Image (tube, rainbow, N blue to C red):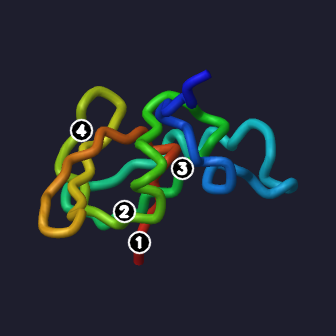
């Protein structure tokens, strides 16, 4: 049988949560707001499946370029290429 190459393949350790952080995440993380141009880091919350970026972008830092519904448009640079991701606030963190 041919091996599956789905969007969550090879993500066993990246998507794993620590035992204390397992379960439903707090609603404050979903309600956090970011301003245009704010620097954010992508930290995937595997308990929330909606608005989850691909696991290859875990740990990247980018700038908020706008909003689309409840999600944020986050611009990142991968190599020399500029990419725009559509990410829900549950998967974003503020960078000081």
Could you give the CA–CA distance between mark 4 and mark 3, rounded to whole angstroms?
18 Å
For label 2, the residue is 40
For label 1, the SS is loop
Q: Is residue 37 above or below residue 96?
A: above
User: Residue at left 14%, top 58%?
Assistant: 82
Compared to residue 20, the image places residue 94 above or below, namely below
Residue that numbered label 4 is attached to: 67
How far is the residue under mark 1 from the one under mark 3?
15 Å
Considering only order in the chain, which callout, 2 or 4, is on the residue closer to the N terminus?
2
Q: Is residue 36 left or right of residue 5?
A: left
68 is higher (above) or lower (below) than 63: above
Which of the labelled discs sits on residue 44, or is there none? 3
From the top left corner, tell me how far across and down residue 80 is, in percent. 13, 68
Instruction: Please name whichever residue, 66 or 61, is drawn nearer the observer in this view of the structure.
Output: 61
Pointers 1 and 2 in contact (C-beta within 8 Å): yes
Quarter where residue 26 is shown? top right
N-terminal-most mark, 1 or 2: 2
Q: Looking at the picture, how far across and down is residue 1, in whole percent?
A: 62, 21
Q: CA distance from mark 4 to mark 2?
A: 14 Å
Tag 4 near tag 1, CB within 8 Å: no
Q: Residue furthest front?
A: 1
Residue placed at 55% from the left, 25% from the top?
A: 2
The image's mark for residue 95 is 1
- 42 displayed left or right of 19: left
In primary-sequence order, the first of circles 1 and 3 is: 3
For the C terminus, the quadrant is bottom left
Label 2: how many residues lie within 10 Å, few (<14), some (14-19) or many (20+)? Answer: many
Instruction: Give the CA separation, mark 1 to mark 2.
Output: 5 Å
């Amino acid at each position: 049988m041919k091996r599956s190459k789905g969007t969550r393949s090879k993500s066993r350790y990246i998507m794993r949560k620590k035992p204390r952080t397992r379960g439903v995440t707090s609603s404050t993380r979903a309600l956090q707001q970011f301003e245009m141009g704010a620097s954010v880091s992508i930290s995937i919350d595997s308990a929330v499946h909606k608005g989850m970026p691909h696991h290859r972008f875990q740990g990247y830092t980018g700038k908020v370029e706008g909003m689309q519904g409840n999600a944020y448009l986050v611009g990142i640079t991968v190599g020399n290429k500029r990419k725009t991701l559509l990410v829900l606030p549950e998967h974003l963190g503020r960078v000081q």
